[in-house]
């Protein structure tokens, strides 16, 4: 933990206190302005549009009341990310050997995407990873705490973690209790906004209208120069995510033991996330931060099993996950897929680099996704690898 804290806050201090860099990305574009608007009495979805959950601007406003600076939000996300690690470790120890858990922690400390997006850009995925880590830590034990923690991510940050709800619900022992607990705050908050006459579909419609790189539709359009029909892309995304949920859910239900079930929950979470990233027309690699510790755990697990392919895919992902988006912003200035096609066909060097990064990213995601699919099949069978966690870390009692 000391190394994690030192690395996170060390990078923060170097960038902002020594080099005097200015906050970038969503901090000045969304987080700070929206927080200031609610501090002045404005209401999300009524007085301003927002891509985030109803209470996200209020959460940021509370942080800014301590010190009204964008750096306060960066520190908050760093604290959330650091606080999540003990919960991830406690969860993983229930089905992984200690040496693999330690390797996963080391990989996480060294992960460039996490360091950049959390410690420098202050992405709100730090808050999501804390709430997901708490939810998984208590799953199979105190279902009420697990469900509530998950539900809070949907009202405090954004709707994106909703893709994990079926996976986590199937991982719970008392599924009905978990589902009811997970829905308490979303029903109260979204229901309250709806009864007040506010359009709670604003975030979904706003995000659904956007298109970014880092996904298969964008790559196909960049290669061909053709805009794929929006309906076709939407149906494709929906079918892929449903198929991922159905397959992973089936394997979760077939898990023969509690440790296999927990392992299936972990890998299913990643499987669904990778499916969304590959198929959805709006997909940033920063989404991986929500459960990057699980990606590190997957890699460490396979290192223990002497399966080196996962380590190679992890290295590719670590190498390209950050620059593939950064390069699209600058120097390319966020081109559409058709614009990128015109650029690389004309021999633009930056466009050719971006195309190469896009291909490498999808290779890494597809490679890890196929390996996870095989892992889920093993977790759902009696012939799963005999690599288990310590019996000294039983499920958390409710």
Image (cartoon, rainbow, N blue to C red):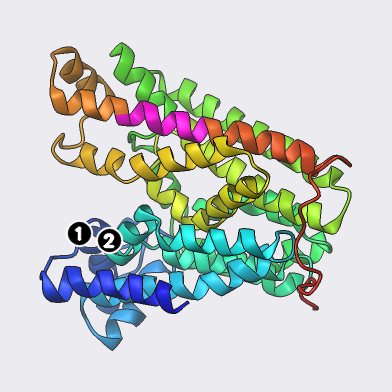
User: Image check: 132 left or right of 327?
Assistant: right
User: Image check: 124 left or right of 354?
Assistant: right
Q: Is residue 246 visible?
A: no
Q: Is residue 359 magenta?
A: yes
Position of the C terminus, as image quadrant, is: bottom right
Q: Which residue is mark 2?
A: 121
Q: Residue at x 20, y 36 (%)?
A: 334
Distance from disc 2 to disc 1, alpha carbons, whole Å, reads 6 Å
Q: Position of residue 91 (x, y in %)?
A: 67, 66
Magenta residues, start to end = 357-366
User: Image check: 370 left or right of 317?
Assistant: right
Q: Is residue 339 magenta?
A: no
The reply to whether the C-beta atoms of the residues labelled 2 and 1 are less than 8 Å apart is yes
Q: Position of residue 127 (x, y in %)?
A: 45, 68
Q: Which residue is mark 1?
A: 24
Q: Residues within 10 Å of mark 2 (few under 14, many from 20)?
A: many
Q: Which quarter of the figure has residue 6? A: bottom left
Q: Position of residue 89 (x, y in %)?
A: 61, 68
Q: Residues within 10 Å of mark 1 (few under 14, many from 20)?
A: few
Towards the viewer: 202 or 207: 207
Q: Earlier in the sequence, mark 2 or mark 1?
A: 1
Q: Residue at x 86, y 40 (%)?
A: 383
Q: Position of residue 69 (x, y in %)?
A: 20, 77
């Amino acid at each position: 933990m000391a190394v994690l804290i030192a690395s996170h806050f060390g990078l923060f201090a170097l960038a902002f206190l020594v080099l005097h860099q200015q906050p970038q990305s969503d901090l000045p574009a969304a987080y700070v302005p929206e927080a200031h608007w609610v501090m002045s009495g404005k209401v999300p979805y009524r007085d301003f549009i927002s891509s985030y959950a109803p209470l996200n601007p209020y959460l940021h406003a509370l942080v800014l009341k301590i010190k009204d600076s964008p750096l306060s939000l960066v520190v908050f996300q760093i604290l959330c990310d650091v606080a999540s690690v003990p919960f991830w470790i406690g969860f993983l120890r229930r089905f992984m050997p200690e040496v693999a858990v330690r390797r996963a922690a080391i990989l996480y400390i060294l992960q460039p995407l996490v360091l950049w997006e959390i410690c420098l850009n202050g992405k709100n995925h730090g808050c999501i990873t804390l709430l997901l880590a708490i939810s998984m830590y208590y799953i199979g034990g105190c279902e009420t705490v697990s469900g509530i923690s998950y539900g809070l991510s949907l009202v405090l940050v954004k709707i994106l973690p909703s893709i994990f709800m079926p996976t986590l619900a199937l991982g719970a022992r008392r599924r009905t209790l978990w589902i009811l607990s997970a829905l308490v705050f979303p029903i109260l908050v979204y229901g309250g906004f709806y009864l007040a006459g506010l359009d709670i579909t604003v975030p979904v419609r706003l995000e659904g209208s956007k298109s970014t790189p880092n996904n298969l539709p964008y790559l196909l359009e960049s290669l061909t120069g053709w805009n794929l029909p929006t309906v076709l892309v939407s149906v494709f995304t929906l079918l892929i995510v449903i198929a991922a949920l159905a397959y992973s859910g089936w394997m979760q239900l077939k898990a023969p033991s509690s440790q296999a079930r927990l392992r299936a929950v972990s890998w299913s979470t990643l499987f669904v996330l990778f499916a969304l990233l590959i198929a959805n027309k709006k997909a940033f690699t920063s989404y991986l931060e929500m459960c990057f510790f699980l990606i590190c755990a997957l890699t460490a697990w396979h290192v223990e099993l002497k399966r080196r392919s996962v380590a190679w895919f992890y290295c590719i992902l670590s190498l390209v996950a950050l620059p593939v988006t950064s390069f699209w912003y600058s120097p390319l200035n966020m081109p559409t897929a058709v614009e990128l096609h015109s650029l690389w066909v004309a021999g633009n060097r930056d466009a050719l680099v971006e195309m190469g990064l896009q291909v490498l990213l999808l290779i890494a995601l597809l490679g890890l996704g196929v390996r996870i699919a095989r892992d889920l099949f093993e977790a759902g069978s009696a012939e799963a690898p005999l690599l288990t966690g310590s019996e000294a870390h039983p499920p958390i009692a409710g």
